[in-house]
Amino acid sequence: MSDQGILVVVSGFSGAGKGTLIKTMLEKHHNYALSISATTRAPREGEEDGREYFFVSRDKFRQMIEEEQLIEYAQYVNNYYGTPRQYVFQQMADGRDVVLEIEIQGALKIKERFPEALLVFVMPPSADELKRRLVGRGTESLEIIDKRLHRAAEEAAGITSYDYILINDNMEQCVEEMHQLIQMQHKRVSGNLDFIEQMKSELKKI
Amino acid sequence: MSDQGILVVVSGFSGAGKGTLIKTMLEKHHNYALSISATTRAPREGEEDGREYFFVSRDKFRQMIEEEQLIEYAQYVNNYYGTPRQYVFQQMADGRDVVLEIEIQGALKIKERFPEALLVFVMPPSADELKRRLVGRGTESLEIIDKRLHRAAEEAAGITSYDYILINDNMEQCVEEMHQLIQMQHKRVSGNLDFIEQMKSELKKI
């Protein structure tokens, strides 16, 4: 089968649990690489450069855009976020499946430029459950929670641009589903044209 | 997730082991239904009407075509083969994934009429291995084996019209891969538009 890694975009509502899902999948299964975004926003407490994000100045970010070092970038509020090209391509060439946890704007740009990318949207089993989880965190004001739910309603309009949805009801199960979904993409005809060509020419010679 | 069954077309070279794969998958996993083709060819020894095929006269087959009782049909040598519509649609409506083991001609017609169908092509690990398996059966003359290999070379031209390839190297593993591949199709966005719409409207109300 194909030795080339798959480019996987994972999006989902805030509170759908996509961060934990991806983290758990990378702990349990090898052969994945997590893309780290570059951002112009300031690091929050506990965040480390090169772990959560590459923290860069606005000038540096503009330079990265100009030099085409980013495969996608988008602006949220007053900050830029982007996916550095070199790491993604290197990991894929090494045969690792690269996971990008990005928002819908960026996801659609990825799909446009790389139609073979796999776009996955993680959903809660219901809107009520999403609210319960956000409230249950106990870390955010009701105002912030309302904002997140409002944003989820907006983001939902974009789900039909994704390839697959995963419902995060049981976390362990959802991790395995995401893993299987990605692994199955290695079997796509479009990613195995060399193998098919080889089989054709072998069959002609036999 | 979607309650509607998936329409799965499985093709593969003679000797690739697709028949055994499908049989084993249906024994190990529930929720599948195997479509039985109608044919005008005479039953071979041991074949039973309604088990291997529905054996029908040429007149009856023509009538089935005219009455649009077949979702696809094709001619091989002097016989007709076709897939009866009613069984397939009934099983899918009942939530079962329906497996069609058909040749490439029929597979392409299915894809044209039902773009959501999943087309899987089962391949041996190599052309040499295919030959070894055909010879190893010990049931066919070298002339027939040569014919099968020649036909495989012709069929190989159509593989790129399929969605996925599965390499049948280890049978048990290949059965699980086929099962996972089919199950993952239930998570396609295009098959879950109702759930997505429901989530959208719930989020607006919350």
Image: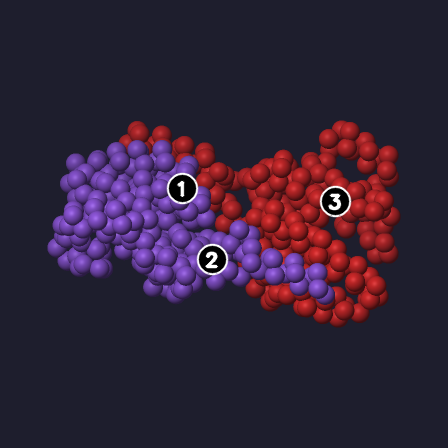
Chain colours: A purple, B red
Q: In the rendered image, which quarter is residue A14 located in?
A: top left
For the C terminus of chain A, the quadrant is bottom right
Which tag is nearer the camera, tag 1 or tag 2? Answer: 1
The x and y percentages for residue A12 are: 33, 44
- The answer as to whether the residues below labels 1 and 2 share one chain is yes
Residues under labels 1 and 2: Cα distance? 22 Å
Q: Looking at the image, can residue B84 be seen? A: no
Q: Looking at the image, can residue A87 be seen? A: yes
Q: In the rendered image, which quarter is residue B198 located in?
A: top left
Q: Is residue B100 left or right of residue B55?
A: left
Name the foreground residue: B89 vs A198.
Answer: A198
Q: Secondary structure at mark 1?
A: helix
Tag on residue A158?
none
Residue for badge 1: A112
Q: Secondary structure at mark 3?
A: loop
Disc 3 vs disc 1: Cβ atoms closer than 8 Å? Answer: no
Residue for badge 3: B37
Q: Amino acid at mark 1?
A: Glu
Residue furthest toward the front? A67
Rendered view: B133 above or below A163 = below
The x and y percentages for residue A80 are: 21, 44
The x and y percentages for residue A2 are: 51, 60
Chain ID of residue with mark 2: A
Name the foreground residue: B29 vs B74.
Answer: B74
Q: Amino acid at mark 2?
A: Gln
Residues under labels 3 and 1: Cα distance? 41 Å
Rendered view: B71 above or below A167 = above
Residue for badge 2: A183
Rendered view: B69 above or below A72 = above
